[in-house]
Each structure stands twice: as structure tokens, then as C-alpha cells.
Image (cartoon, rainbow, N blue to C red):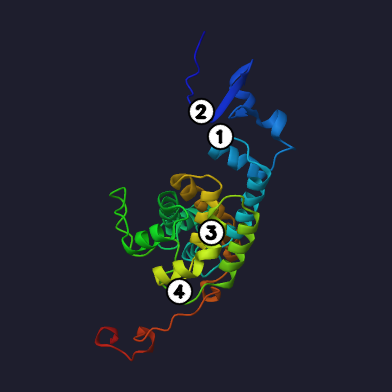
């Protein structure tokens, strides 16, 4: 009996009898995707199954959908969306613009790595206020040499002044839906955590608590955060394509020493 050279616990394919390169049946963790799931399962069901290896409960699928809506578009103020828009207005290929969004949105300040760190904090600290205060006061060293030591508490906006309304709305809606402990605890203890962090809660903090309640590990949460924010970046890229950089919809930059306003220089004289 021949053994398939493809090794994955996630996906199993049965080839067509007349073509070994064409798939007859595709199963995700044992579920027949095209023969049973298609038409019955939703996007959240499929994503949860892919990452967690099991079908979600009703509340988990509902939370996944809510989180996807909350994360879908970070808006043009967000550096990752801003980077993607620059690609669109500059005529970059679609993949390049999305890669710009992924690259800029991958970091430890408002990006996916911050979500990784925040989910790790949830696993270490649970719903223990003292443990959270200790963690915020003494940030742990990075696991990998790739990343520098974090400069602020993960999940909080080091440049923020007060908690944005949309962050509070997202936290309230997700906490109402979740059957896990973290979102509800975060909602009850938000002010005390913000005082300890000396920074307001950020959307990354809400996303991390939601993903932890859903059972995702830090690396899974990091990947999902990157994925969930791509739709907005893509839409803004398409909006900018074919327009002039002079119409870029963002605050104009006023240079204190603008060369265009200077008089003639020795180099410019004939």
C-alpha cells in the first residue's frame, strides 16, 4: 500500500481516479469540506476548524464573526492601512500593497506581535489583577532574538490619552457574547489595568482577550490578527488606485524647512 507523500494533520485529500493531481474529496480535520460543509458552515466555522482542529460551538462561531467585523478595517489612521494605501496610489501590484499592510501591521506597537504578547500575558496571568500588575511593571524578555524587548504593556496604547469609544464598544459587545472568562474580567477591571499601564486599552488588547477566550494560542492569535485586518487594507488600496498622490486622503505634511519655499541657491544658479 503506497503512502501519500503529503503529510499534514489539517488536510486530507483523495485524488481523482484518473488524475492524481486533481482532488476528489477534501477533508479538514475529518470534515468533508465540499461534500458536507459547503452550504452548511460559515466562514467562522471554517477558520476556527482550520486553526483549532475542531468545529466551534455556536457562541464561538458568533464571536469569530463579531471579531472579524471589529477587525476588518483599522482605518486610514492605522499605519498598516496607510502603507497599503501608499501602494495603491503608487500603482503597486495588489500583492505588494497587501504585503506592505502585513509588514507594517506585524509589529509590537499596535500590530500582530503585540497581540501575540498580550495573549501570552493572558495565559500567564489569567484573571489575577496582582499578576497583571506585576507583568505590566516588569515586562518579560522576548522569546526570540528577532524581536526587541517590549517598551510598553501589550494591549495598551502607549501614545493614547483616553480609551477610544470604538474600543469600549468592541469590548462590551464581545464580552456580552463570550462564554470565556477574560473579556468579562477585562471589562470589569479595565480602569485598574489602564492605571497600572499608564495607558488606555487598545484594540489589540480587546482582540487578544477575545482570541484567548476562543482558545487560540499566541502564535495562532498573531496570525489571525494579520488575516482579519486585510479586508480593510485591500478596500482602501482599490479606492486609491488610479488617483493622484496630490489627492491622498490624509493630513498634509508641513515642512518647517521646505526646499520649495527657499530662494535660489548657489547650486541652482546658472
For mark 1, does the 10 Å Cα neighbourhood hold few (<14), some (14 to 19), or many (20 or more) residues?
some
> Label 1, on which residue?
53
| Front disc: 3 or 2 | 3
Whether pointer 1 and pointer 2 mark residues with C-beta atoms closer than 8 Å, the reply is yes
What separation in Å lies between label 1 and label 4 (alpha carbons)?
37 Å
| Nearest to viewer (mark 2 / mark 4) | 4
Query: Mark 1 or 2 closer to N-term?
Result: 2
Q: Residue at x 56, y 47 (%)?
A: 214
- Mark 1 and mark 3 residues within 8 Å of each other at the beta carbon: no
Q: Earlier in the sequence, mark 3 or mark 4?
A: 4
Task: Out of 234 and 126, give the one closest to the viewer.
Answer: 126
Question: Who comes first in sequence, dot 1 or dot 3?
Answer: 1
- Note whether residue 108 is visible: no
Q: Using the image as rendered, state which of residue 93 and residue 230 is in the foreground.
A: 230
Q: Name the residue that disc number 3 marks.
A: 185
Residue 18, by quadrant, is: top right
Front in this rendered view, residue 201 or 83: 201
Per the image, the residue denoted by label 4 is: 160
Q: CA distance from mark 1 to mark 2?
A: 9 Å
Determine which residue is flagged by label 2. 9
Residue 152 marker: none
Which structural element holds mark 3? helix
Mark pair 2, 4: CA separation: 43 Å
From the top left corner, tell me how far across and down residue 23 is, in percent: 62, 25
Q: Residues within 10 Å of mark 4 (few under 14, many from 20)?
A: few
Mark 2 vs 4, N-terminal side: 2
Mark 3 near mark 4, Cβ–Cβ under 8 Å? no
Amino acid at each position: 500500500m503506497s503512502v501519500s507523500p503529503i503529510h499534514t494533520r489539517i488536510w486530507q485529500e483523495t485524488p481523482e481516479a484518473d488524475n492524481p493531481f486533481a482532488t476528489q474529496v477534501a477533508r479538514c480535520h475529518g470534515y468533508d469540506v465540499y461534500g458536507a460543509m459547503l452550504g452548511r458552515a460559515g466562514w467562522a466555522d471554517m477558520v476556527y476548524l482550520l486553526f483549532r482542529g475542531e468545529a466551534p460551538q455556536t457562541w464561538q462561531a458568533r464571536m469569530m464573526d463579531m471579531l472579524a467585523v471589529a477587525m476588518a478595517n483599522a482605518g486610514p489612521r492605522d499605519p498598516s492601512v496607510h502603507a497599503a494605501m501608499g501602494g495603491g496610489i503608487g500603482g503597486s501590484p495588489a500583492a505588494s500593497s497587501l504585503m506592505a499592510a502585513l509588514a507594517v501591521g506585524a509589529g509590537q506597537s499596535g500590530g500582530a506581535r503585540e497581540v501575540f504578547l498580550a495573549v501570552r500575558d493572558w495565559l500567564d496571568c489569567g484573571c489575577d489583577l496582582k499578576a497583571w500588575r506585576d507583568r505590566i511593571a516588569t515586562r518579560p524578555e522576548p522569546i526570540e532574538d528577532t524581536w526587541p524587548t517590549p517598551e510598553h504593556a501589550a494591549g495598551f496604547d502607549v501614545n493614547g490619552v483616553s480609551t477610544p469609544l470604538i474600543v469600549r464598544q468592541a469590548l462590551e459587545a464581545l464580552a456580552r457574547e463570550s462564554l470565556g472568562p477574560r473579556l468579562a474580567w477585562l471589562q470589569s477591571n479595565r480602569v485598574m489595568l489602564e492605571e497600572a499601564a499608564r495607558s488606555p486599552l487598545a484594540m489589540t488588547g480587546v482582540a487578544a482577550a477575545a482570541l484567548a477566550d476562543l482558545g487560540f494560542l499566541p502564535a495562532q492569535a498573531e496570525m489571525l490578527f494579520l488575516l482579519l485586518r486585510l479586508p480593510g487594507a485591500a478596500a482602501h488600496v482599490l479606492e486609491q488606485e488610479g488617483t493622484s498622490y496630490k489627492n491622498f486622503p490624509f493630513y498634509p505634511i508641513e515642512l518647517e524647512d521646505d526646499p520649495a519655499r527657499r530662494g535660489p541657491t548657489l547650486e541652482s544658479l546658472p
